[in-house]
Image: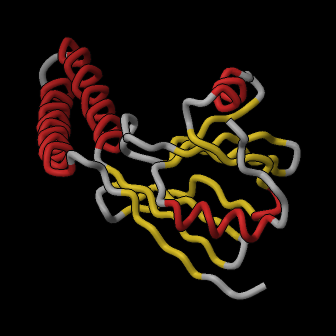
Amino acid sequence: MRDVLYEESIIPKNLKLQKTVYIIYTIFEVISIIIAAISLFFMLYFSWSFLIFVIFFALSATLFGFVKRKIYYCVDCTFVTGSTRLVKVVNFKRRKKLLIFEANEVQKIGVFGSDSSQKIYLDKSVKKIYATPNKSAEQLFYIFVYQSGLKYMVIMDCTQNYIDNLIAFTGKQIIEKD
């Protein structure tokens, strides 16, 4: 088998809007942290009644920080000679590994929305991994992976070139019929 290196970055379609929302949430997060610190100062030196403000603004800052990481991200897909690495990249800086799997662990590949994909999707024992920032893309593919006793359904917005490389390295017929 020949060596193959294929890299793809799945970028959101509404990147500018997501970046704007990310910046707004960052500003709200910083403001919440500042107000929580000022409330903590007033609580320590004046009255314990400011405790509710400290808790509220600390929780607000945490919530804004959590939500902003869910909005502005892309997914990097790297395929190297039978091994696929899926990484979520938040704000084009922080990287979080989603899944690494080998081609021999792939059980089925197909178009998301077909009958067989819905059957796998509704199975409660299958962990769903959305490897796309575009939940409403025109052409989503699914990859059903069985890895060390766990079942994964990876839903991707990838090119046909990646699917062709993955099928070539599995060595078996795994593409769905319907």
* Quadrant the C terminus occupies: top right
Q: Is residue 87 above or below residue 41?
A: below
* Quadrant of res 121: top right
Q: Looking at the image, which residue is at 72% across and 41% down? A: 177
Can residue 34 be seen in the rendering of this structure?
A: no
Q: Looking at the image, which residue is at 72% across and 87% down? A: 2
The x, y position of residue 96, in whole percent, is 50, 57
Can residue 104 be seen in the rendering of this structure?
A: yes
Most distant residue in the top direction: 49
Q: Looking at the image, which residue is at 20% across and 30% down? A: 40
The x, y position of residue 132, in whole percent, is 44, 47
Q: Looking at the image, which residue is at 14% across and 50% down? A: 16
- Which is more toward the observer, 79 or 37? 79
- Which is more toward the observer, 62 or 84? 84
Most distant residue in the bottom direction: 2
Q: Is residue 100 above or below residue 81?
A: above
The x, y position of residue 141, in whole percent, is 55, 45
Most distant residue in the right direction: 149
